[in-house]
Image (spheres, rainbow, N blue to C red):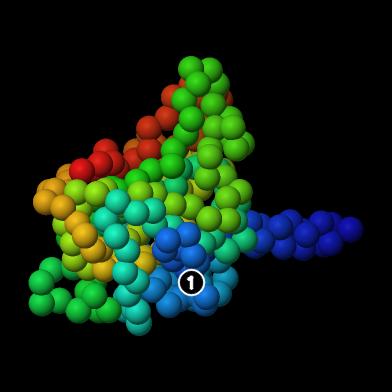
Amino acid sequence: MKLTACMLLLAASAHAHYKFPRLIVDGKPEAADWVSVRKTKVSNSRDNGAVSDVNSADMRCFGGSSGKATSAVAAGAELGFVVSSGIMHFGPCQFYMARVPDGKDIDTWDAAGSVWFKAGSISAVQTGGPLSGNEATWPAYHKTQVAFKIPAALPSGKYLVRVESIALHLAQNVGGAQFYISCGQVDVTGGGNGVPGPLVAFPGAYKASDPGLIWPNSPPRTSYTAPGPAVWEG
């Protein structure tokens, strides 16, 4: 019986992991995985695992170092990701973008250094009372699709779009947060003249001790701020 219970626990834990393998443009998900989204490491693309070290290069695109397609999307439009299995752990879901420099190939550009700005965040719903670990506090929890609106002032050009779901279910102590990450490739059209910022690097944008990466069991939290810079709204 003990062995059976252990096996069931491991199976449940594996099922609770997830990935972001498809873009959603104009409300339409891509027909197949890893088309305009760079394929992540086997530990995620096959096994649905997470990144746990904020200082790892996997914090950038989870090993997705090259792409094979780019989707066109208009500035001001909604852009989203399909979540395989759904987001199975509570916490914020955030979106970053990095413009591909002129003369660089979007399929191979590694987006190293301070090139990322935060374009969207689905964070905790602040009520003034105790926050919970359910959908009432976390709007992205259990969702099979997540999306944000590309700022209308964003200049036209090619961008990497990084989605991250920060799982806080094991984050009672420093280093317990888990990161589920993918990077999509888009060509933004009809953009404006905005100057996105502040710019941050992955790794580098977060420290394991950031308050937004820790979720104590007690006392209950009554406020929460997601890690990283403020959302650039254009």
- Residue for point 51% across, 62% down: 82
Q: Is 111 or 220 nearer to us in this picture?
A: 111
Task: Classify residue 71 by image quadrant.
Answer: bottom left
- Residue for point 24% across, 43% down: 232
Q: Is 1 or 98 nearer to us in this picture?
A: 98
- Residue for point 38% across, 38% down: 226
* Residue 165 x/y as whole percent: 46, 51
Task: Give the residue furthest to the bottom.
Answer: 68
The residue wearing badge 1 is 30
Q: Kindly state the secondary structure of the residue where label 1 is placed.
A: loop
Quarter containing the C terminus:
top left
Q: Can residue 163 be seen in this view?
A: no
Task: Give the residue furthest to the right.
Answer: 1
Q: In this view, does 3 lie to the left or right of 112?
A: right
Task: Classify residue 174 by image quadrant.
Answer: top left
User: Looking at the image, how many numbered discs can be counted on the residues?
Assistant: 1
Q: In this view, does 194 lie to the left or right of 31?
A: left
* Residue 93 x/y as whole percent: 44, 47
The amino acid type, in three-letter code, at marker 1 is: Glu
Task: Classify residue 209 by image quadrant.
Answer: top left
* Residue 179 x/y as whole percent: 45, 54
* Residue 147 x/y as whole percent: 44, 52
- Residue for point 61% across, 36% down: 134
Quarter containing the N terminus:
bottom right
Task: Give the residue furthest to the front.
Answer: 190
Residue 86, compared with residue 219, is above or below; it is: below
Q: Is residue 155 left or right of residue 214?
A: left
Crowd rating for badge 1 (residues with CA inside 10 Å; few <14, some 14–19, many 20+): some
Q: Can residue 70 be seen in this view?
A: yes
